């Protein structure tokens, strides 16, 4: 979020604190296809891509809805556990 306006950072921070931490399952919707097992939380035109692992919430990417999904996919491991190329 470096370089983002403070008001946007505040909106994201507030959404994470008030919605995601309170109830991570209800805060976002499940994703499909290559992102199955992950969830998205909408904050205006931004999306918070995350997964829930027991009591831990892992935030993978925060970005604009138009490109956040393409940017998060290369960060995910393939079936062998290695990071995808891209």
Image (cartoon, helix red, strand yellow):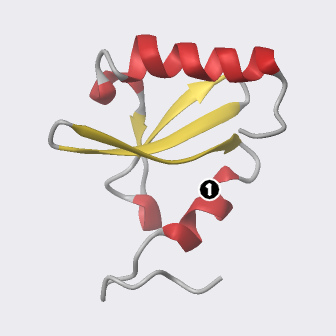
Measured as percent of width and height from the top left, residue 70 is found at 66, 63
Residue farthest to the front? 2
Residue ID at (17%, 36%): 55
Residue ID at (55%, 13%): 14
Q: Is residue 72 above or below residue 58?
A: below
Measured as percent of width and height from the top left, residue 33 is found at 44, 64
Q: For mark 1, does the 10 Å Cα neighbourhood hold few (<14), some (14 to 19), or many (20 or more) residues? A: many
Q: Is residue 54 above or below residue 12?
A: below
Measured as percent of width and height from the top left, residue 44 is found at 69, 22
Q: Quadrant of residue 24?
A: top left
Q: Which residue is mark 1?
A: 69
The C terminus - image quarter: bottom right
Measured as percent of width and height from the top left, residue 77 is found at 40, 76
Q: Is residue 78 above or below residue 60?
A: below
In front of the other: 32 or 20: 20
Q: Quadrant of residue 10?
A: top right
Exactly how many numbered labels are in the figure? Answer: 1
Residue ID at (76%, 47%): 66
In front of the other: 62 or 35: 62
In front of the other: 29 or 75: 75
Q: Is residue 83 above or below residue 76?
A: below
Q: Quadrant of residue 28?
A: top left
The N terminus - image quarter: top right
Give left or right: position of 26 versus 40: left
Give left or right: position of 59 versus 42: left
Residue ID at (30%, 89%): 80
SS at badge 1 = helix
């Amino acid at each position: 979020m470096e370089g983002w306006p403070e008001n946007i950072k505040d909106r994201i921070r507030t959404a994470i604190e008030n919605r995601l931490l309170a109830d991570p399952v209800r805060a976002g919707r499940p994703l499909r296809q290559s992102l199955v097992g992950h969830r998205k939380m909408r904050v205006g035109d931004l999306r918070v891509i995350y997964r829930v692992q027991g009591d831990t919430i892992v935030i993978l990417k925060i970005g604009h809805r138009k490109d956040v999904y393409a940017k998060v996919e290369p960060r995910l491991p393939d079936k062998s556990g290695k990071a995808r190329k891209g």
